[in-house]
Image (tube, helix red, strand yellow):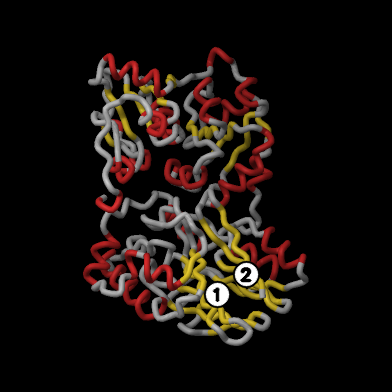
Amino acid sequence: MKVEQIYTSCLAQGSYYIESNGEAAVIDPLREVGTYIAMAADRGAKIKYVFETHFHADFVSGHLTLAQQTGADIVFGPTANTNFNCLVVEDNQEFKVGDITIKLLHTPGHTMESSSYLLLDENGKETALFSGDTLFLGDVGRPDLAQKSDLTQEDLAGILFDSLRNKIMPLPDDVVVYPGHGAGSACGKNMSKETVGSIGYEKANNYALRADMTKQEFVQEVTEGILPPPAYFPENVRLNKQGYNPENDNIAKANIPLSVEEFKAKSIQEGVIILDVRSAADFVKGFVPNSIFIGIDGGFAPWVGTIIMQVETPILLVCDANRLEEVATRLSRVGFDNILGHLSGGVEVWDQDDLETMNSITADTFNTIYQRDNQIDIIDVRKEAEYKTRHIVSAVLNPLSNLENDKLNASAENFVHCAGGYRSVIACSLLKREGMHNVTNIEGGFGAIKNTVIDLSAEVCPSTL
């Protein structure tokens, strides 16, 4: 028996390859499925099933592509309704993969079709749980994504409570837990950085699995402090449920070279976004007017989805040529397939006098300005929880995920920071694109600022947030 986790840090997402005696199954595959096919081919195995834990909101799954290329059956839990052929199966239904058994446990609450998959080894021993977005390490799935007119997030949280108590917590303590996501995912709020755990550890340490916890307490704690979901989530659910083009040609489209004249002509078409994915340091020195910065070396795909939102949006790329394939792949993971090409030769071929720049200063320079005038306008674009933990006393909270222009001073310079300098450059690029040029990025973000003599709020214990 072989179990392998394929963890994608950009999405904080875990997919799984399971194999026994010449047969294999894949759980929650990424859209680019070559890894799974190669693993099976290397070991002479046939992929028999593609198991989906639910309709994912934060990425486009590779279920259709993998089924098309291997002939595997796609499996969803009860109540799933799709526009493509798949097996919608019953609670506790079992599937043979070589000498092992995989049992579907219907665990609704995150969504109503949400299911976990329990692996029983060759001797029938309960060995591992692939818990999807039902149970994370340190957290449980958010219950607000599947709200309908007849189901509130409180209703879903109550259903999730029952799923956890009735289906997951009774499992033996030594059952290995393979979750759908880890720290950094927007699908939970308190996830561990670890990516593999156990039932016993979670029962002892996960706040949501306390033995003495009432359903009312669970509902209150699980729903408290949930941030609004990224705007692209419904788009990805739609693609995963209704289907998408399995023949993904994003890489070919990204590799289309465009001259400056061609690039300019396409950039003025309706709805086109110029997406600059270089480093923040390179971007601030010079960029094509009206570009949005979302660097490939940060939380790229989730921020593309959060900022651009609509997967049909036509995108022009400004990118180092040797990273075009990576950029195209990561865009496709969140359903952004409408790439028009890239600026051939990069910003170096653009009229240098026509490039825009961004004010960007070090934390030490910012401290000097602050000591001279502590009434300056400071914009903190981190998450609320980060801000509450510690912040500059006079800073205004304005999270990047919901950036509000009216929180900025229209008649004075606004000094913008995040935690490390990535999100603040995104924020400044968005503001400049909307005509607000009185913004200055603080390099190194709060991580650098806190080492100066800036007046900071008292640090609070995260458990009080």
Q: Residue at x 59, y 66 (%)?
A: 16
| Type of amino acid at the residue the image marks with label 1 | Val
Asked whether, in this view, residue 439 is left or right of residue 99, the answer is left
The residue that mark 2 highlights is 3
Image quadrant holding the N terminus, namely: bottom right
* Residue 28 point in image, percent of width and height: 55, 65
Instruction: Point out which mark residue 75 bears.
Output: 1
Determine whether 352 is above or below 71 in the image.
above
* Residue 310 point in image, percent of width and height: 45, 46
Q: Residue at x 62, y 24 (%)?
A: 260
Rounded to the nearest whole Å, what is the CA distance between mark 1 and mark 2? 19 Å
Q: Secondary structure at mark 1?
A: strand
What crowding class fits label 2: few (fewer than 14 Cα within 10 Å), some (14-19), or many (20 or more)? some
Foreground of the two, 414 or 266: 414
Circle count: 2
| Type of amino acid at the residue the image marks with label 2 | Val
Determine whether 331 is above or below 26 in the image.
above
